[in-house]
Amino acid sequence: MKKRHWLWNLLIVLTLIVCVFAFVIHYKNWHKIEEGELRILSGIYYQKIPISEIDSIMFVDRIPEMERFNGFSWSATEKGVFKDSLTETKVYVFVDDLRQQKIRLVHGDSLKVFLNFKDSLKTQKVYHFLNEELMANLEDPN
């Protein structure tokens, strides 16, 4: 019986670890709100949005038809960088479930972000927090 070289075993184990890691970081949207910023991470897609630069926020049922720049769609999940066919601008999509409502965020005058989580209550909680922060910034711009 011929033995396999230890390097091949190591390569197989490392490949499996990388695949599991890639699945975990793409599995859901990771977010953090701190120091006046919303940070969203999903795999290689990352956005850091200062809350003070948010121009508008609203719930939408559907995202518009867009052209994929890079990203992926799988089942009810859609993530990546897309191009709005009407305005020719980049749109960042972090949608864990297309069947649920999505947060439509516009910041920096024209950059759009569509965001939701698998848990619709978490989506509502983030929306209400950001909306309250936006209203507070409008009332007291300092």
Image (cartoon, helix red, strand yellow):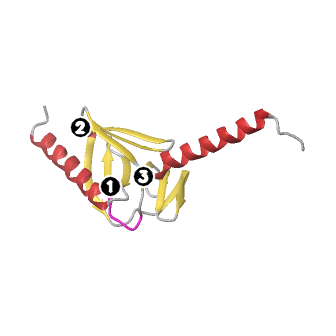
Residue at (29% x, 56% y) in the render: 123
Q: Amino acid at mark 2?
A: Ser
Which label is found at residue 52? 2
Q: Kindly give the residue lying farthest to the front in the view shown.
A: 1
Alpha carbon distance from label 3 to label 1: 10 Å
User: Few, some or many C-alpha atoms within 10 Å of disc 3 (few <14, some 14-19, many ≥20)?
Assistant: many
Q: Residue at x 51, y 65 (%)?
A: 75
Q: Which residue is mark 3?
A: 94
- How far, Cα to Cα, is label 2 from label 1? 16 Å
Q: Are marks 3 and 1 in contact (CB under 8 Å)?
A: no
- Residue to which mark 1 is pinned: 104
Q: Is residue 106 left or right of residue 1?
A: left
Numbered tag placed on residue 24 in the rendering? none
How far apart marks 2 and 3 lie (CA) works out to 21 Å
Look at label 1 and name its amino acid.
Arg
Structural crowding at the residue carrying mark 2, measured as other residues with C-alpha within 10 Å and reported as few (<14), some (14–19) or many (≥20): some
Tell me which label, 2 or 1, sits earlier in the chain: 2
Range covered by the magenta-colored residues? 98-102
Residue 87 on image: x %, y %: 43, 53
Camera-side residue of 34 and 25: 25
Residue located 27% across and 43% down the image: 54
Q: Secondary structure at mark 3?
A: strand
